[in-house]
Amino acid sequence: MFSGSIVALVTPFSQGKVDENALQDLVSWQIAQGTQGIVTCGSTGEGALLTKSERDRVISLVIEVAHKRVPVIVGCGAPSTQEVVQMAQDAKRLGADAILIVTPYYVKPSQEGLYQHFLNVHNSTDLPIIAYNNPGRANVEISIDLFLRLTELPNIVALKDSTNDISRPALMCSRLSKPFNLLCGDDPYTSAYLGQGGDGCISITANVAPKLCKELMDAWKNNDRANFNLLTQRLIPLHLSMVAEVNPCPIKYAVSALGKIKNELRLPYLPVTSITEEKVRSAMKAVGIL
């Protein structure tokens, strides 16, 4: 259901407010470039820093412009299960195609607590759910045993896996009893993740190089290993530049360097340093997008 190159879309701001025109233009451009899905209000989109009314407006605008040409997936994450249930229901009301549910951050629940969290959200909506494993931000991990329990819930159809342990997809695939989409959540590991059984990537880099990210997925799908290897090597410096500082600070600068948005973030995020700016610009020039 969810595979290929999916962008974790930035949220543009102008003078402290959501830049609605820039947001709409980004969605149109992403689709024209071949992006196969859009995540809005995720961590790259500064979703945790948006007000309730801003979230609703951003989701509505993305859905309106996408117009069912690609799936729109809404990021839903909070320490409180009750709050995530409300986010999921809001996403359904606004017309989302799916929701991305990150593990609760800060509160450090047990594996059983994580299961009950996902179960409660699952039972609150009929939207397809992508579970999101991001131990670097949430400080808890969806273990492989827990993952297998989650796959038994019919509306949980995919996993976004932000991990540098690329043995995970092979281990998960070896124990799966039904089709399930495994999506890499960290661009530098995407090619290796695909080789271990992954189906695609929810990508930061796709914000600035959507066509190249889609070409990488096509090369893998078409068994074009020569082109796949070339694209992997071509993209890796760009991927690494996007994590030179905490996401979404480098990618916000990169998209602004393309002239598509202003380099404006919400506190406590700050613009990247001049050193990181140079790394990002150099990597963008090297792949021919700047």
Image (tube, rainbow, N blue to C red):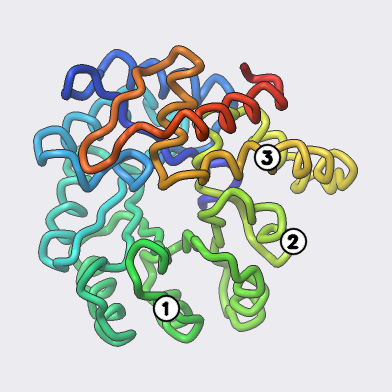
The mark nearer the N terminus, 2 or 1, is 1
Amino acid marked by disc 1: Glu
- Name the residue at 41% across, 44% down: 247
Which residue type carries mark 2? Answer: Gly
Specify the label residue 152 is tagged with.
Answer: 1
Q: Quadrant of residue 14?
A: top left
> From the viewer's perspective, is 127 left or right of 39?
left
Q: Amino acid at mark 3?
A: Pro
> Of callouts 1 and 3, which one flags the residue occurring earlier in the amino acid sequence?
1
Q: Nearer the viewer, residue 154 or 112?
A: 112
| Label 3, residues with CA under 10 Å away: few <14, some 14-19, many ≥20 | some
* Callout 3: SS: helix
- Disc sitting over residue 276 in the figure: none
User: Residue most toward the right?
Assistant: 226
- Categorize mark 1 by other alpha carbons within 10 Å: few (<14), some (14-19), many (20+): few
Number of the label disc, if any, that sits on residue 237: 3
Quadrant hosting residue 131: bottom left
3D distance between C-alphas at marks 1 and 3: 38 Å
Disc assigned to residue 195: 2
Of badges 1 and 3, the one in the foreground is 3
Residue at the image position 47 percent from the left and 86 percent from the top: 145
CA gap between label 2 and label 1 equals: 25 Å
**Labels 2 and 3: the sequence-earlier one:** 2
Residue 245 location, x and y as percent? 45, 44
